[in-house]
Image (cartoon, rainbow, N blue to C red):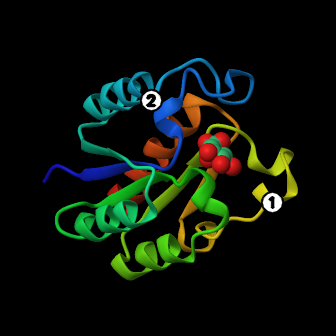
Amino acid sequence: MTMKFLVLHGPNLNLLGKREPAIYGSQTLADIDVSLEKLSAELGCELSFFQSNSEGKIIDAIQEAADGCHGILINPAAYTHTSIAIRDALSAVGLPCVEVHLSNIHRRETFRHISMVAPVAIGQICGFGRDSYLLGLHALFNHVKNK
Ligand code: DQA
């Protein structure tokens, strides 16, 4: 059976490429998704992608993933630090989830050091730019495969 994963990008990540490139790099979200597609072809899994600036839409996408997805790769962006609702949705669907960030949130402002999502994730990868997503997909894939 082919494994399917949902890749979820939170608010303002649609601006990647133009948004604070010194922090987030010059790659666009489309560049990141293309790299993930390439890796998924190598691993032999399927991905679906969703970006939203709206908390409710992200929650809807998490709930919908329960139907047919084997795990979630998520960069909740600023909602990482605020959203009990996203954390509860991840916990409710119970799918394995890996949290990723382009920047190292632990080296930045103290309000970014807290993640609401981390306690319900298998793990968190941050600080490696696009590679955070690629490492995250690898880790999620191996976790589900070895379960
Ligand atoms: C981010 C880090 C968050 O603190 C920030 O709000 C983002 C992006 C990252 O990928 O580094 O929007 O999740």
> Which residue, given by chain and number where applicable, does mark 2 sit on?
29
Residue 137 percent coordinates (x, y): 43, 44
Q: Name the residue type under label 2.
A: Leu
Q: Quadrant of residue 39?
A: top left
Q: Residue at x 80, y 60 (%)?
A: 111
In-image side of 143 versus 107 (left or right): left
Q: Position of residue 57 (x, y in %)?
A: 35, 61
Residue at 51% of width from left, 45% of height from top? 136
Label 1 beta carbon within 8 A of ligand 1: no
**Is residue 118 positioned above or below 8 on the image?**
below
Secondary structure of the residue carrying tag 2 is helix
Q: Residue at x 42, y 21 (%)?
A: 31
Quarter the N terminus occupies: bottom left
The residue lying furthest to the left in this view is: 1
Mark 2–mark 1 distance (CA, rounded to whole Å)? 24 Å
Disc 1 packing (10 Å; few <14; some 14–19; many ≥20) = few
Q: Is residue 135 left or right of residue 45?
A: right
Residue 77 percent coordinates (x, y):
58, 50
Number of numbered discs: 2
Residue farthest to the front?
A: 54
**Side of 5 relative to 53 (left or right):** left
Q: Is residue 62 above or below residue 5?
A: below
Q: Earlier in the sequence, mark 2 or mark 1?
A: 2
- The image quadrant in which ligand 1 is located: top right
Amino acid at circle 1: Phe
Q: Classify residue 120 by image quadrant.
A: bottom right
Marker disc for residue 111: 1
Pick whichever, 2 or 26, lies toward us: 26
Mark 2 Cα shell of 10 Å, populated few (<14), some (14-19), many (≥20): some
Q: Quadrant of residue 82?
A: bottom right
